[in-house]
Amino acid sequence: MILLMVGLIAGAGVFINWLYSPGNFPIRKIELVNKLENQGSRELQEVSAEAINGGFFSLNVEQFRTQLMQKLPWVKSVSVRKVWPDKLLISIKEHKPVVRWQSVNRDINKGKKGEDEPYALLSSEGLVFKPKITASQQAEFNKMALLKGTSENAKQIMQHCYVMNEYLQKINLSISQCGMNARRTWQLRLSNGIRVKLGKEQMLPRLQRFISSLDGALKNYIDRIAYADLRYSNGFSIKWKPQPEADMDSASGLSKTKQE
């Protein structure tokens, strides 16, 4: 009985080793069950090719899933399932980019000499990711608004910029750039080209005051405004675009009134 049990255990070990040998029951088919919008198929094939060398039993599904997450920046989540006898089913959920992103973290922006900062996007969940993109993708994404700030605060910055954009839409304007610079000062660029400096606090009240003026006393002068500094307790200053001298006289008077 003892010899029989030893023989069974040894035989089971040999059988398990045989099952888990990569050369036995090889993975021959990898099937993507959903359509990808942005993730390049070549990158997916390169990562997946590593799994084909593994066997049905020897392939570590969780490790393979982790590799997909790490090596494919577009991938938000992925599920991998084995189908007997030689197939893998892969389901991928991609990040949905909503705006472009530029980090103001100096240690991140400081790359090697001559090395370009990777093209960064911000997902609908406020996650910064840096995918490899094609020329056509870049042309499309360049139409998106640009947000700036520290990567750890990306979600909060996106939320603040969305609120500001909703206020501006009430006067048929929108945000093309929004966020903080390296000194943590909030700045905007509006869809009509106006640059706005908001400061470090009371951004929404200051912007609301400026919007009220754009919809009121400044309504007929919006196209003349180049820059607005809202960092005043009871008003703001304006820099006008170059205009003929006759027009500048009336515009300067209006600017001084608003500062007071």
Image (spheres, rainbow, N blue to C red):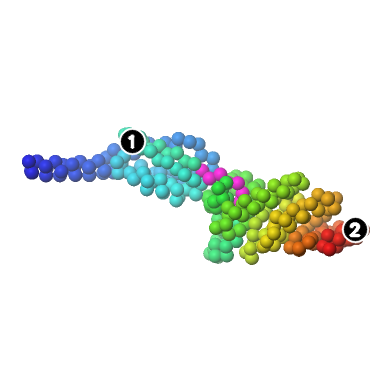
Q: Neighbour class for label 2 at 10 Å: few (<14), some, many (≥20)?
A: few
Please name the residue shown 55% across and 48% down the image. 125
Mark 1 to mark 2 CA distance (whole Å): 79 Å
Tell whether position 107 is magenta.
no
Q: Nearer the viewer, residue 208 or 133?
A: 208
Which residue is located at x 64 percent, y 60 percent?
Answer: 180
Q: Which tag is nearer the camera, tag 1 or tag 2?
A: 2
Left/right of residue 195 with respect to residue 250 in the rendered view = left
Q: Residue at x 85, y 53 (%)?
A: 217
Indicate the amino acid at tag 1: Asp
Q: Which residue is mark 1?
A: 86
The quadrant the C terminus occupies is bottom right
Q: Residue 119: in sight, yes or no? A: no
Percent position of residue 177, x then y: 67, 53
In the picture, measured across the screen, residue 89 lies left or right of residue 57, that is right
Q: Quadrant of residue 207?
A: bottom right
Q: Which three-letter amino acid code belongs to the residue tagged 2?
A: Ser
- Check if mark 1's residue and mark 2's residue have beta carbons within 8 Å: no
Q: Nearer the viewer, residue 159 or 11?
A: 159
Label 1 vs 2, first from the N-terminus: 1
Magenta-tinted stretch: 94-101
Q: Quadrant of the N terminus?
A: top left
Q: Residue at x 61, y 58 (%)?
A: 149
What residue is disc 2 on? Answer: 250
The x and y percentages for residue 223 are 81, 52
Instruction: Locate residue 96, reporting x and y percent.
Output: 56, 44
Residue 234 falls in which quadrant of the image?
bottom right
